[in-house]
Image (cartoon, helix red, strand yellow):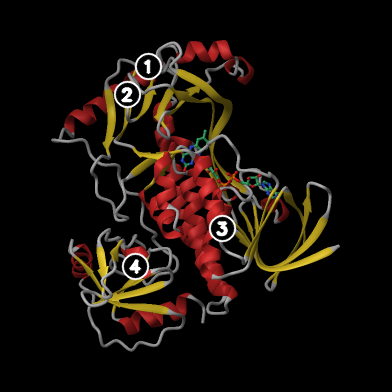
Amino acid sequence: MRTLQTDVLIAGYGPTGETLAAFLGIYGIRAVAIDTAREVYRQPRAAHFDHEIMRVWQRLGIAEQVLPSTRALPAYEFRNSDGQVLMRFAQAGVATPSGWAPSYMFHQPAVEEALRARVAQFPGIDVRLGTSLVSLERNDANGVAAIVRDDQGLETRVEARFLVGADGGGSTVRRLIDGQLTDYGFDEPWLVIDTVVTDEEGLPPFGLQMCDPKRPTTVMPMAPLRRRWEFMLLPGETPEQMLDDARIEELLKPWVRPGQAELVRKAVYRFHGLVAKQWRVGSVVLAGDAAHQMPPFMGQGMCSGIRDADALAWRLASAVRGEASPALLDSYQEEREPHVRSIIETAIFMGRVVCTLDPAAASKRDQDMLAQRAGQRQAADPPPPPLEALNSGCMMPGARAGQLFPQAMQACASNGVCGRLDDLLGPGFWLITRNAKIDTKWPMPVKTVVLDEDISDESGRLNEWLDSTGASAVLVRPDRYVFGTGEPAALAAALTQAIGR
Ligand SMILES: Cc1cc2nc3c(=O)[nH]c(=O)nc-3n(C[C@H](O)[C@H](O)[C@H](O)COP(=O)(O)OP(=O)(O)OC[C@H]3O[C@@H](n4cnc5c(N)ncnc54)[C@H](O)[C@@H]3O)c2cc1C
């Protein structure tokens, strides 16, 4: 059998695996990425991503390719069967730390194509499609040996320093490490229908949850001229009945004119909440749906996998280069799991609001939510609550640690080049300070950036942010989360400890 050696073997080349491969390419790490399928899955599952993920696409250099197949979402509404608004989050014009709009609706295959084209630019990333991971011969502190098989039956042994299981909800990698799942006990069947429409006349421009106990329904814009409807299956209904074209036409009748929508996809999914108990065993790590799955009411399943890939890539790169101990990987689950769980719990809360079938319970819910909305009446609807910050992991506890560092969208470097902050400063750790005389010794490469000298930000946002911490400097991680704020020497000592050196 042929043997192949690499730094990181990525099993599964969906959005999580593609993002991880692209970041490893940027960090100059060798990887082999495999996927059973030969092509990008043509039908989108995810329809929404948030500002932080748009910033990830920017950092990967594909924002401009992604934007044409997206649209910013102006609002997200929950209505009752009478059409009364129970809850509404306004998103248009809301500022975010990333500098991008709060939420985007998009066409998943277009984003995946852009990601794959980006990965193809890195000679160190070897992508093998039509190839499955079938077994694990070795998994210890020094690395893994895995057997992969292509669709012609040819087997190869891949020896890698790390294996990342990004192979989706039915993960083979999770099974091979005997991974157990915890189950939130939410399990609801829904019909998902995607359409291409001739025009969007009469269709809501925002995301809509119809909390109608007679038929809970989700109505979502996707990419321009693409629309999704989701209909909850009622007790006694079978997937076969719901997938019947005549039934689908009947379900869509209240929403579209004859001939307005062409059906391009129909599927029944069970929406559930699952989290793997152990995200790392030896040199094997789980990411994306292999590590967690959630109901789509927050549109955060794929986003969470992208965050996993971002959090994992710099840790793997640092460990492969010997800059950090592999123990740095322990902080991956420590910080990602609570973040993911808080999203799953909110998504399940929203799901329970939407999926109420008992008319009496629905009526009580409506009264409570309408009263709450009337009580909170403000001039405008509130923005969506931000996702939780990281509350433990690779960071120096203190002001703003674990938050996303803000991005200035119009900064200028000392050489006169202006643009978005992340593009100007590039990948890696940044120490941002106003003190030009810093000569701190760092345990790994850190770029020192002197505000108003190396970088100026006309909006004043970065200066304001630093002033609000009361600290002289901020250390920003490669995934753009704040490691900590404080004196550079203290930050260097905390970083040395956090990376296990
Ligand atoms: C109806 C619906 C709506 C959703 N809406 C949203 C949304 O709006 N926003 C959002 O963020 N998320 C959403 N999600 C969730 C999102 O689709 C998933 O979280 C996301 O696809 C997970 O990406 P992944 O790369 O981790 O896994 P996957 O996309 O499942 O990719 C895994 C890959 O691994 C490959 N593979 C499997 N086994 C092997 C093996 N043994 N060897 C090699 N390759 C293998 C598969 O072929 C596949 O390509 C939605 C999901 C559903 C079902």
Q: Amino acid at mark 2?
A: Arg
The correct choice, above or below, for 52 with respect to 125 in the image is above
Query: Which mark is first along the chain, 1 or 4?
Result: 1
Q: Residues within 10 Å of mark 4 (few under 14, many from 20)?
A: some
CB within 8 Å, label 3 to label 4: no
Q: Are marks 4 and 1 in contact (CB under 8 Å)?
A: no
Q: Using residue 132 as the reference point, say whether residue 459 is left or right of it.
A: left
Mark 3 or mark 1, earlier in chain: 3
Disc sitting over residue 424 in the figure: 4
* 2 or 3: tag closer to the N-terminus: 2
Kind of residue at badge 1: Ala
Residue that numbered label 3 is attached to: 119
Answer with left or right where residue 256 lies relative to residue 412. right
Where does ligand 1 appear, by image quarter? top right
Q: Amino acid at mark 4?
A: Leu
Mark whose residue sits in front, 1 or 2: 2
| Distance in Å between CA atoms under marks 2 and 3 | 42 Å
Residue of label 2 = 79
Earlier sequence position, callout 2 versus callout 4: 2
Secondary structure under tag 2 reads: strand
Contact (Cβ within 8 Å) of mark 3 with mark 1: no
- On-image quarter of the N terminus: bottom right
**Label 2 CA crowd tier, 10 Å (few <14, some 14–19, many 20+):** some
- Note whether residue 309 is visible: yes
Report whether the residue tagged 2 is closer than 8 Å to ligand 1: no
**Is 279 rendered above or below residue 498?**
above
* Location of residue 159 by image quarter: bottom right
Q: State yes or no: Cβ of the residue under disc 1 lies below 8 Å from any atom of ligand 1.
A: no
Give the CA separation, mark 3 to mark 4. Answer: 21 Å
| C-alpha gap between disc 1 and disc 2 | 16 Å
Judging by the rendered image, the residue that carries numbered circle 1 is 360
